[in-house]
Amino acid sequence: MFTFFENLLRPTEISPEAPPPALDEKRGLLRFYWHFARQVRGLIVALFAAGLAVALLDATIPVFIGHVVTLVSTHRPETLLAEQWKQLLGMAALLLVARPAALLLQNLITNQAIAAGMTNMVRWQSHWHVVRQSWTFFQNDFAGRIANRVMQTGPSLRESIVSGTNAVWYILVYGTSAVTLLAHVDWRLAAPMLCWFCAYGGMLRFFVPRLRDRSRAMSNVRSALTGRIVDSYTNILTVKLFARARDEDDFVRETVEEHTDAFRDQLRLSTRFVLTLTLMNASLLVGTGAMSIWLWTAGHIEVGAVAMALPLAWQIANMAGWVAQNITAIFENVGVVQEGMRSIAVPRQMPDAPGAAKLQVTQGGITFQHVRFGYGTARGVLHDLSLDIRPGERVGLVGHSGAGKSTLVNLLLHFHAPESGRILIDGQDIATVTQESLRTQIAMVTQDTSLLHRSIRDNIRYGRPWASEAEIVAAARQAEALDFIETLEDWDGRRGFDAHVGERGVKLSGGQRQRIAIARVILKDAPILVLDEATSALDSEVEAAIQSQLETLMRGRTVIAIAHRLSTIARMDRLVVLDHGRIAEHGDHAALLAAGGPYARMWLRQSGGFAQAAQ
């Protein structure tokens, strides 16, 4: 039985549909809810039906109490069971069989089918969308805050739907049945409850929007607090190196105090809400009791009606407290969902073009045509830059910091789109191909190497997930990484290729991370190779060993290499010197030295510096 309901919703087996609807002020929240709810609408309808059954059965309990009191007061003890056993047995069957069965069905749908399944379906699809956002998206926010929003939105969305479904039925069924039953006995008996319902509606109208707004504010501050804490932990080495733990305390303390203030504001309103409801419920009980006693003493109602009216009023009071708590929780969760939408319901900043095809690389020629780009600034970074790189050509990009070398590579990888101009690979405009197919054809080693918090094997295999063990070992050997890999052991006793490297690879030295990254690129075996200070973290001996391997790796590929140490790229087929976003000169090493231009001056400074240091 449990397995059946648990298998009704498998969160990762539901393929993510179109991205969640974009955030807007009017209909965005409802559309966001419906985006996920429609995928499990069968379960929500079932929950609605089960909630109706439970509410109807619960509404019969005061009626049964009043009926039993009437039977006891109008029958002699020796004749009661003989004359009324069918009614008593029917009431007992409803309470002993039907109500537990309805509650069991409601709990199976809520707990086994919806709770885990829908929560993680929302998380899975939110992550699926967020991880496909542009690089700029992640640069503009805390990773911790984005992760917190993805994790919190799922349970909050699910809980608000489930609680809302149950609250609707309890309000409709209890309220309608209670007023109808009391009015059927005597219309005056229903008067206190009708007044209470009017006051209850006014109370909800006053408090609920304020609870929602304060919950949203608190959720926003909580995400900011999470982001700041994660930022400190992620950069803990920098914190330690600069002895800035107390400054980090101040950085986090500010948001802790903001969160405390927001939390207190919310709790203050909740306390007022509970006090108001308590006074209203007390008034309902006293009013119903007084009306019942007055009508009974006047002979207008029987004692059974009194016995029914008081439990109904008490049940309504308890229901009101439960519904009020649920409504409070619902709007707290709605506030969390609204805050989460700021990361999840964001249109993809750089989606693939409609009808984008897969990039087909047959030769590897790269063309930059009149490319302009400046990260939205008026000054710009690249200015009308045109460059042809022949298939199989090895090109070194040279220039001072800020000249546009990394920007050119980022545009080639389509992390940003040119503000004007085009970039072609084998004649195909990269703006018209899928980004995934583009980056599959380009292998890159960066200066700031970041590894996944997984095993050495998983990190190397990231370049080609289907690679065999022999291919992984061969790539590690070619990257001069095999010797140190075989000596590794992590905190859980895993050794060699099974050892985990820690977050961002912190368990390894910079040179070791660089060699793992090179092994990953070797295994990827892409036709276009980008080296951005690929050997900057290596000592001279290891760099010399890897340089020969890189020579082998570059053979037959189109290569773009960036290096500040000109000696590492002097043997490239062509060197392109960038200056303030323009090509100042290009040619091979010898030709550029002979020209006596910017490259020659940079070479003289570096080689002269080495010579002076050696004296």
Image: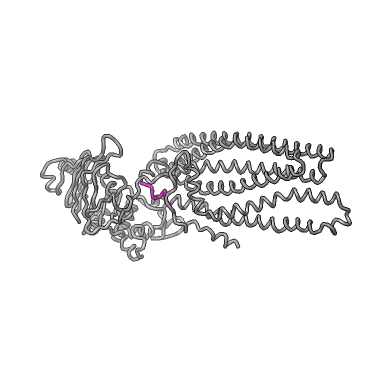
User: Count of labels shown?
Assistant: 0
Q: Give the residues drawn in magenta, as a range.
A: 128-134
Side of 350 relative to 292 (left or right): left
Q: How is the image coloured?
A: one colour
Q: Quadrant of residue 285?
A: top right
Q: Is residue 293 left or right of residue 467?
A: right
Residue 240 in sight in this render: no
Say which quadrant the C terminus sits in.
top left
Q: Residue farthest to the left? A: 594
160 sits to left or right of 382: right
The quarter of the picture where the N terminus appears is bottom right
Residue 225 image offset from top left, x and y in percent: 48, 39
Q: Position of residue 567 (x, y in %)?
A: 20, 48
Viewer-nearest residue: 445 or 222: 222
What residue is shown at x 54% (from left), y 59% (from top)?
Answer: 8
Q: Is residue 21 magenta?
A: no
Most foreground residue, 378 or 549: 378
Q: Nearer the viewer, residue 24 or 343?
A: 24
Instruction: Give residue 405's quadrant in the image.
Output: top left
Q: At which x and y percent is residue 81?
A: 84, 58
Q: Residue 487 at what x, y percent from top left?
A: 38, 59
Q: Residue at x 39, y 53 (%)?
A: 452
Q: Is residue 69 visible?
A: yes
User: Does residue 423 sit above or below 522 in this rendering?
Assistant: above
Residue drawn at (50%, 58%), measured in percent from left and top?
10
